[in-house]
Amino acid sequence: MNLFYYIGKSSFERRVNPPHSHDYWELVYYFKGRGTSTAGGTAIPFSRGVLIAYPPGMEHEEESDGVYESAWISLRRDSRPKVLSFCRDEVHRPIERLVGVLHKEFHLKRPSWSMLCNGIIDLLFLYLSETRAAPDGGNYVERMKDMLIENIHEPSFTLKSALRTFDRSPRYLLKLFKEAAGVSPMQYLIDLRVKAAENLLATGMMSVREAAHELGFRDPYYFSRLFAKKTGVPPSRVQALRKR
């Protein structure tokens, strides 16, 4: 169980927050702006989507490059290992949404607010622990995977355009992804689409043509050949098995 002290939001012009510490956990999520936070000898660049958890007693400081907005959460959490952790939000911003709900429920104080807020905090620490355990470069790989999952249904998606949104070269990102995932990003996306199509066809909810369209394939015949190559059976066979 977590004991909440306060959950607030702040907006500052360029700011230098000098070294300080607390006897409680402090989580900070950045909605806007850029800068650097330093804690425990670790410099953490921040921008939109970065979540940092400072453990009790750890001195930390913060300097922004300009205007920035953040949410901060102060709480007791005795069961948590007291280590610095941080992560970057995924493409569809689940952490940002969770922080928004957390802030709202804390201030509304509806009958179930404590249960809701405790559940959200547990989720935030889960995101932090999973990302902290990732190897060097793992954050880029996870962000690319998030991007690919977001575009499972998008036929106009192009990897070339998508990789321009990262702060690393496409060549570096492609190499990093292949080393971590064992396949190229586009092959990973194709595998996602084929698996999703297999699930859709197995439910009997869609025809082969409809499933192809739903999963971003403009040509159902190409989809059928690709599906058979990946799974060993044609998509029509999956449908036939479902109807038995």
Image: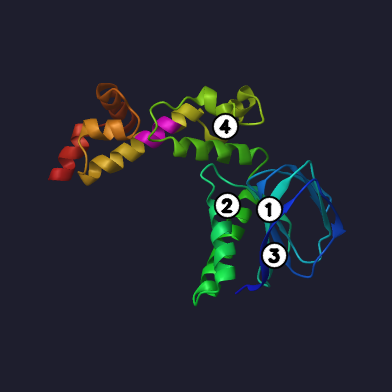
Numbered badge on residue 81 = 3
* Mark 4: secondary structure: helix
How far apart marks 3 and 2 lie (CA) works out to 23 Å
Type of residue at label 4?
Phe
239 to 186, vertically: above or below: below
Numbered badge on residue 27 = none
* Mark 2: secondary structure: helix
**Residue 88 placed where, x, y %?**
63, 46
* Mark 3: secondary structure: loop
The local crowd at label 4, few if under 14, some if 14 to 19, many if 20 or more residues have their Cα within 10 Å, is many
Q: Overall secondary structure of the magenta stretch?
A: helix
Q: Is residue 62 magenta?
A: no
The local crowd at label 1, few if under 14, some if 14 to 19, many if 20 or more residues have their Cα within 10 Å, is many
Name the foreground residue: 208 vs 5.
5
**Whether residue 234 can be seen here:** no
Please give the residue where the numbered disc 2 appears in the rendered image.
96
Please give the residue where the numbered disc 1 appears in the rendered image.
70
Determine which quarter of the picture holds residue 202: top left
**Residue 136 placed where, x, y %?**
68, 40
* Mark 1: secondary structure: strand
Type of residue at label 3?
Pro
Question: Going by the image, does 110 lie left or right of 84?
Answer: left
| x 51%, y 74%: residue | 110
Please give the residue where the numbered disc 4 appears in the rendered image.
177
Q: Earlier in the sequence, mark 2 or mark 1?
A: 1
Range of residues picked out in magenta: 189-193
